[in-house]
Image: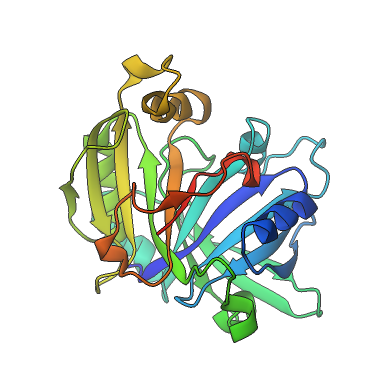
């Protein structure tokens, strides 16, 4: 089974703006580089728990693209996708298929770092285009992960105190059917949890990995509240605009991820980072 949340993805038109805004709220940002194919470039916010936030932008945002994140860019960008880490993707794909969810065979990708180091990895994407199911993709490094993910103390220490990702909340149309897909990917039980979050009818949660740690919550919004102007309308508005996907993420400053919930902590200004809903707990 996947061992952890590898990273979350924030997409916007201008990488420089994302970097500046991230630094303004206390994150240390490390230059990433240009991806294979030359369509996108990125910068990374790396954490002590080994996970990271990828800030990514299209080098030519006006140029139409078949990239799986391009359509989301034109809907407004923001928190767009996320990945789970494994050490044998071919075996993981077979296991996910055996658990009842058909996912594609691994495909390779890479990135050239500013220092000239070439990185390679492979991924399997359960949803060809973001918004279809909201399910995470699974990634395996072909070159050492330490080359892909910053890990030095000065790269993983942040003025805002964040030490890692606790969990991700996905907005989905039907929590029951999405629970089946999520359980097939994580290999862990998906159990009903408290639905006290505003605008949510039902919620289920799955751990990521065999040890207590990262979690994923799937939340089914009350679509009747789509026109509400308060917080209760936000999940339904997300579903209407973006489809299924990552609605929010909780970042920890040291608390065990298992002790935190989707509403834990204080939210970063949602006018920043292309509207990404990030909470620091």
Q: Is residue 172 visible?
A: yes
Q: Is residue 162 above or below residue 216?
A: below
Residue at x 35% of width, y 17% of height: 225
Q: Nearer the viewer, residue 121 or 252?
A: 252
Residue at x 29% of width, y 37% of height: 197
Q: Quadrant of the N terminus?
A: bottom left
Residue 192 at x, y percent in the picture:
16, 45
Residue at x 45% of width, y 40% of height: 245
Q: Is residue 266 above or below residue 150?
A: above
Residue 224 at x, y percent in the picture:
33, 15
Residue 96 at x, y percent in the picture:
31, 58
Q: How is the image coloured?
A: rainbow
Residue at x 57% of width, y 77% of height: 157
Q: Quadrant of the C terminus?
A: bottom left
Which image quarter: residue 150?
bottom right
- In the shown orientation, is residue 6 left or right of residue 219? right
């Amino acid at each position: 089974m996947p061992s952890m949340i590898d990273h979350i993805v924030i997409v916007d038109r201008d990488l420089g703006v994302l970097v500046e805004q991230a630094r303004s709220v206390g994150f240390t940002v490390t230059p990433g580089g240009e991806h294979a194919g030359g369509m996108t470039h990125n910068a990374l916010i790396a954490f002590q728990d080994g996970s990271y936030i990828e800030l990514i932008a299209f080098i030519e945002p006006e140029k139409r693209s078949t990239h799986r994140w391009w359509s989301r860019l034109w809907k407004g960008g923001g928190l767009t996708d996320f990945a789970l880490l494994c050490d044998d993707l071919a075996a993981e794909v077979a296991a996910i298929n055996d658990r009842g969810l058909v996912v594609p065979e691994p495909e390779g990708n890479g990135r050239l770092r500013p220092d000239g180091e070439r990185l390679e990895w492979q991924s399997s994407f359960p949803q060809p285009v973001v918004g279809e199911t909201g399910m995470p993709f699974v990634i395996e490094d072909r070159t050492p992960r330490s080359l892909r993910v910053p890990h030095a103390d000065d790269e993983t220490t942040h003025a805002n105190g964040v030490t890692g990702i606790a969990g991700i909340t996905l907005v989905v149309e039907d929590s029951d059917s999405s629970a089946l897909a999520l359980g097939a990917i994580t290999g862990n039980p998906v159990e009903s949890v408290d639905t006290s979050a505003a605008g949510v009818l039902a919620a289920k949660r799955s751990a990521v990995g065999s040890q207590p740690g990262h979690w994923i919550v799937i939340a089914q919004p009350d679509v009747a509240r789509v026109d509400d102007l308060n917080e209760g309308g936000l999940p339904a508005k997300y579903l209407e605009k973006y489809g299924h996907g990552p609605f929010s993420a909780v970042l920890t400053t040291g608390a065990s991820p298992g002790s935190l919930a989707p509403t834990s902590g204080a939210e970063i200004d949602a006018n920043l980072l292309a509207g990404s809903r990030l909470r620091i707990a």
